[in-house]
Amino acid sequence: MSLERFINQHASSWMSGTGPHSDVVLSTRVRLARNLDEVCFPTVFQFDDAKKIVKQVNDAVSEKLSLELLKMEDLSPLQKRVLVEKHLISPLLAESSLYGAAFISEQEDISIMVNEEDHLRIQCLSSGLKLQETLDEANKIDNVIEESVQYAFDEKRGYLTGCPTNVGTGLRASVMIHLPALVLTRQMNRIIPAISQLGLVVRGIYGEGSEALGNIFQISNQLTLGKSETDIIEDLGSVVHELMSREQSARDALVKTSKLQLEDRIFRSYGILANSRIIETNEAFQCLSNVRLGIDLGYIQHISKSILNELMILTQPGFLQQYAGGPLRAEERDIRRAALIRERLSMQETN
Amino acid sequence: MICQECHDRPAALHFTKTVNGEKTEVYLCEKCAHEKGEYLFSGHPAFSLNNLLGGLFNSEPLFSSNPAFREEEVTCEKCHMTFQQLLKTGKFGCANCYTTFDSKLTPILKRLHGGNTMHQGKIPERMGGALHLQKELQLLREKLNEMIASEYFEQAADVRDQIRAVEQKLSGEGGGS
């Protein structure tokens, strides 16, 4: 299969690199945790309960929403891995859920996980910064499901969840943000602790820790109880706006004070991506981040902005193996990764 | 804070271990934490959060140091989860657990949610009108206070009328949920 077709087939709509503030914000995600009232939570429930829940959710959504039901037991490990890499399902659902399933929209911007840590995890994804719209979308789905099921809800504690860290709104809103200039000017180390004090969490895109792969950070709310959904996303939104404007001033300052060094860094990275034969994830991400910055600053003009969002997902192990059509060892993946990136870049040049 | 193990990388994780009431704090970077605690971080998707949460429940002095409390076995009628199991897993077994363990929950929720213990967000439509009206009433009362504080008395009078209307509707519904 040609790479172009592969990307067209496998890139989700939220990876398009469009949407508001997409020069800094890659994507927005909203997740609502819900449980059905009568049935025990997935921590302790039995196989029959799990099966019943999938059926109930299917009945609730099948007429009103056009979603495809994927049962974890029917998928190969590689298929599941690709879904995890696309953020459509969680590793927990893929590997250790009892009768786990996911309802996924064709555009891959909606995914309802069933029998994960909670009975339902309603998840919506958008490109760029769209907190309110994405929350509205998730609420719409929530309301549709609620028409036919009885949620576990308590006046005092709100929506009841398996883990007490999600109780209340069950809402986790997160924004994926590219902050190369703040990292380059060493400001992130000071910013991260400050954000944590506001009830928000900052992570590198692969887990905790201050090292972020490709200068991409995920910022999300920590508190789910005691604040309304709107307050939660407004607080998150205002911090994201603050970060965007700081990133912008850091970029301006870099262009003003070290234009040549910056340009050198960007074009060197481009050179590596366009020519390397073996490349590890870390180096690929760092170079992609630099190239993306070069595109944002107008130094590189013939490549589309979506390259970072796309390659960030498509150069992960699961995807590389799917594209190769079989399992690959780590060294083979590095070779494949380099080839895929080279091909992706030349695809754009010939266009 | 620098990692206590390698003295090189910045510490990303902070553990507090309590053994027999004696507290030890450990700061580790991700790599050392990974190496030190294979069983915690071995890529198992359930990860360590629950273990950490279990610790959070445990560290409540009320539960860990009061032997009388430990003897008393509270069990959820619906899913048969005991409080000890809840401490161990950090996860509830069913909706009824929240009622069963309610009295012990407030301090934990406070700690997890920045001092908050009461839900302020969305209410399911099905929960019936009363709850929605109560919520509306609460919002209107807050609005009234704000208006009085900023001396918008005319608007405040309107809000007061709205409050009365909602109160009437509420008493019509039987006074609440």
Image (spheres, rainbow, N blue to C red):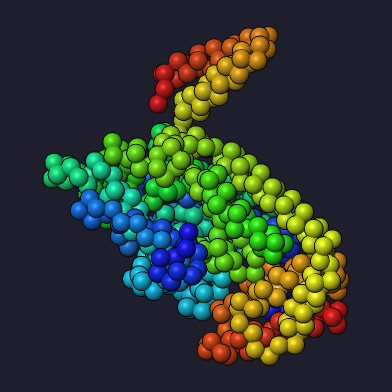
In x, y percent, where is residue A288?
A: 71, 73
The percent position of residue A125, horizontal first and vertical second, equals: 62, 57
Give x and y (percent) for residue A331: 56, 90
- Relative horizontal placement of residue A93, taking residue B38 as reference (left or right): right
Nearer the observer, B33 or A258: A258
The vertical placement of A81 against B125, above or below, is: below
Rendered view: A207 above or below A20: below
Residue at the extreme front:
B7
Q: Quadrant of the N terminus of chain A?
A: bottom right
- Relative to B168, B69 lies left or right: left
Q: Nearer the viewer, residue A19 or A9?
A: A19
Picture residue at 41% right of the left edge, 61% below the top: B27
Is residue A22 visible to the viewer in this orientation of the structure? Answer: no
Classify residue A11 by image quadrant: bottom right
Q: Nearer the viewer, residue B83 or A215?
A: A215
The location of residue B21, given as percent across then percent down, is 22, 50
Regarding residue B61, the answer to whether it shows in the image is yes
